[in-house]
Image (cartoon, grey):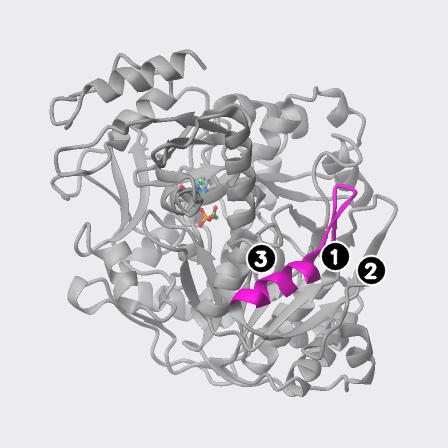
Amino acid sequence: MSGNTYPPSAEFKKNAHVDQAKYDAMYAASVNDPEAFWKEQMTRLEWSKTPTKIKNTSFDYHNVSIKWFEDGELNVSVNCIDRHLATRGDQTAIIWESDDPNVDQHITYNELSEKVNKFANVLKGLGVGKGDRVVLYLPMIPEAAYAMLACTRIGAIHSIVFAGFSPEALAARVSGCDAKLIITADEAPRGGRNTPLKKNVDKAREHCGDVACLVVERTGADVGMSKHDHGYTALLNEASSECAPEPMNAEDELFILYTSGSTGAPKGVVHTTGGYLLYAALTHEVTFDYHDGDIYWCTADVGWVTGHSYIVYGPLANGATTLMFEGVPTYPDAGRFWAVCEKHKVNQFYTAPTALRALMGQGNSWVEKYDLSDLKVLGTVGEPINPEAWNWYNDVVGKGNCPIVDTWWQTETGGHMMTPLPGAHATKPGAAMKPFFGVQPVVLDPTAGTEIAETECEGVLCIADSWPGQMRTVYGDHERFVKTYFSDYKGYYFAGDGCRRDADGDYWITGRVDDVINVSGHRMGTAEVESALVAHAKVAEAAVVGYPHDIKGQGIYCYVTLMEGEEYTDELKTELRNWVRQEIGPIASPDLIQWAPGLPKTRSGKIMRRILRKIAENDYGALGDTSTLADPSVVDELIDNRMNK
Ligand code: 6R9
């Protein structure tokens, strides 16, 4: 099953931070003596108080507790800005590429410092202090990075809500963390169209109450300001450019980021200051083989964890030049990614398989038009990458010269957990390959919950010990944290993914083993879409599953039962699609709705999703045992419906 392997070139290996021998030695050190390993690594950060306690962690179900560097003190903005000023004040920190291909901006570390200090004073002026929560609902503009860093400067905790989420979803997150302030923009230009962010905030406040709002003027549109609203530019112009950094304990909360799980509403994943930053910085340097002077571009949005760790915190902690892109891959045309790579001489490029699949379908000429000779390393994240897309990335984009790092990780893990290192490992199309330093993956038998000892095996992926970037808790609900990640397989962190280990001991992620689906690299709980559907007055019941989708990886397949007497019409399907977009956001828009006058249920009333998944996949031969169903004829009816669609 291993297929072709792609070793790094001799030249690449020669210049790489980590080659095979170094990886082996460092990995062994990191798991044999984590205390010593991380004590040495922590010196890559600047601490105002050096930690003496390194690791204090327990995965014991009765007492899950994760602390790293717990008596250390530091400030994230100092690490991402101040300590670079003496040596690289005039170096570009952020290259901003606007939605409009004719507009860009280079922001030096000196300029970043000035903006962040001023922004921090603006926040203080609005009454925000240490420990307060601030929600960011912003386009991909430099002010998003300024806002994040300004929060860290004063010890406020940010919670970013992706600008594609609806007012309803925004309101839930604002209330969920009891935010003191929302930072937004008038509008968000993307792909030539403007999303009315400030108007969305106004709608959200109908649900979550009158939280104060700071409005960045991105397009200058007239958005109507109430007494709860403040214009950004005027306040920034008045603010002092000096704001003393708040010394933070390593375990003080840095940010909250809501993410979907298999049950219930999204959870507020909590990351803390020291361990997270160290892990983001180390992984950024090692995984991408980032060298001083390189131009690095991650195409994610800061609304997702990838944007947190690999647009802002990791790169800036390393004094890197990080590119931030406001637009979409297909605007003004399908060559945009490659045009930006050529224009800014990008060396490391990090994107999602879904974008590659979409661009692959547009033909090679879009890539071939541009000079991509500066590219050195290519990365992917967010979902399994199919070999076709991997090969296209390797051959057409990388011209066979750029190692591909397929990075497996999660919002919960803070940074890369498994990935090939570009100068160390011969990559395999679709394999996440090797654990990062300090990460101890195990493959468990799903039912017995025991570790599988054989090298070649398949099962559920768990992690046996803590690493510094690990989430610490679910905001306001430690019990949920324990229940979600430590109760199915006692003594381990359960990631929710399945995996295969091949004969060489390399890891392949096979996808989620729970009710989470991955749509265009966006993670979604099927339960969230179901609860949006049943909130519609005409819907009695809904069951949502993923099905294979050529571009998105997985599409959203909804089985819907209507209230007694309602009519099953095509118009209603459209109405339900729009309804879900409004409840959650366009990313949750159902791809297929199938009317289901009956759903397959066990006698105890549990929906048999396994069967629904198979029907959605058009795979009727493998429905398995249907004898426990209360009414097996329901299945035939669903299959008939599916086939007649
Ligand atoms: C960083 C991020 C996490 C889930 C994760 C897994 C899937 C991410 C992957 C991958 C296969 C990869 N996933 N990277 N699957 N190969 N390289 O995406 O975080 O949004 O929390 O999603 O994404 O299923 O469990 P998040």
Q: Residues within 10 Å of mark 3 (few under 14, many from 20)?
A: many
User: Ligand 1: does it lie within 8 Å of the C-beta at label 1?
Assistant: no
Quadrant for the C terminus in the image: top left
Q: CA distance from mark 1 to mark 3?
A: 14 Å
In this figure, which residue is indicated by the disc labeled 1? 187
In this figure, which residue is indicated by the disc labeled 2? 221
Magenta stretch? 187-207
Q: Are marks 2 and 1 in contact (CB under 8 Å)?
A: yes
Identified by mark 2, the residue type is: Ala
In this figure, which residue is indicated by the disc labeled 3? 167
Question: Quick check: 430 left or right of 335?
Answer: left
Between residue 50 and residue 447, name the one nearer to us: 447
Question: Quick check: 196 left or right of 546?
Answer: right
Q: Earlier in the sequence, mark 1 or mark 3?
A: 3
Q: CA distance from mark 2 to mark 1?
A: 7 Å
Measured as percent of width and height from the top left, residue 321 is found at 70, 57
Frontmost of labels 1 and 3 is 3
Whether residue 620 is visible, yes or no, is: yes
Residue occupying the far right of the picture: 102
User: Ligand 1: does it lie within 8 Å of the C-beta at label 2?
Assistant: no
Quadrant for the N terminus in the image: top left
Per the image, label 1 sits on a secondary structure element best described as loop
Residue at point 29% right, 14% down?
620
